[in-house]
Amino acid sequence: MDEPVLLTGAGGRVGGAILEGLEDAYDWRLMFYTPPDEEPAHDYLVGDITDPETMREACEGVGAVLHLAGDPRPEAPWDSVLQNNIHGTKVTMEAAVDAGVEKFVFASSNHAVAAYEFERQPEIYREESEYRLDGTELPRPKNLYGVSKATGETLGRYYHDMEGLSVCCIRIGNLTKGHPPVDYERGQAMWLSHRDCAHLHQCAIEAEYDYEIVYGISDNDRKYYSLDRAKEVLGYNPQDNSAEFED
């Protein structure tokens, strides 16, 4: 992509993993909620995603938006997820549409469907299990943070259908710098390495699609999220597997 790519929430864990792998791949425009500790090497701005004027400025002239900003706490209270995650996503998508942005990549979460686990434990943790969520299932959050992510996916559907915005929602798993403990079954199943995180988001920037929901995990032996859609539509080719670290 020749046009700049806007990355909201650039100071967070996912933003750090993306920049670590794709620092030189794009002309980045970074957005922070508070001033960064060090001067970034790219164009940046500091502001609140709930402010329409700020987001219009942020989206002006960019070709794609990677929207990561919001309250990342699974235990976040309703007032916070309503304002920062739901309203902030709506304002950002609206600004992207008004600016003529081509693609919008939304950082959703495994929390949007986490309640499915209660129904199928311990089956979903077995390596030989064929149980897979593939993105076609209805949302089933188990906390208000998950509700906000499911709502963000629905906002993406709306702005695609009504405004023609290409939207890819990535239900991000367990992103860690290293690997999860070998006895942490859930973490092993939904692990996402930094390398695969950067690659998946690059695929979402470069691929052609209308509206998609895909899962953001590495190619783990133990997984109950399907990677088929991410591979087929985005060209995702994950390199890492949590099982490789068990010894």
Image (cartoon, rainbow, N blue to C red):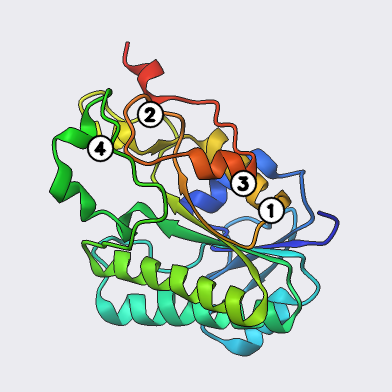
Q: Residues within 10 Å of mark 3 (few under 14, many from 20)?
A: some
Tell me: residue 93, above or below residue 67: below
Amino acid type, callout 1: Ile
Q: How far apart, in angstroms, are the residues tagged by discs 1 and 2? A: 26 Å
Task: Name the residue that disc number 1 marks.
Answer: 205
| N-terminal-most mark, 3 or 4 | 4
Q: How far apart, in angstroms, are the residues tagged by discs 3 and 2? A: 27 Å
* Outermost residue to the right: 2
Q: Identify the residue at horizontal 50%, vertical 39% (top origin).
A: 228
Q: Which mark is residue 156?
A: none
Horizontal side of residue 178 vs 76, given as left or right: right
Q: Residues within 10 Å of mark 4 (few under 14, many from 20)?
A: some
Q: Residues within 10 Å of mark 1 (few under 14, many from 20)?
A: many
Horizontal side of residue 60 vs 87, given as left or right: right
Res 188 visible: yes
Amino acid type, callout 4: Arg
Task: Name the residue that disc number 2 marks.
Answer: 179
Res 47 visible: no
Q: How far apart, in angstroms, are the residues tagged by discs 1 and 3? A: 12 Å
Task: Name the residue that disc number 3 marks.
Answer: 233
| N-terminal-most mark, 2 or 4 | 2
Task: Name the residue that disc number 4 marks.
Answer: 186
Q: Secondary structure at mark 2?
A: loop
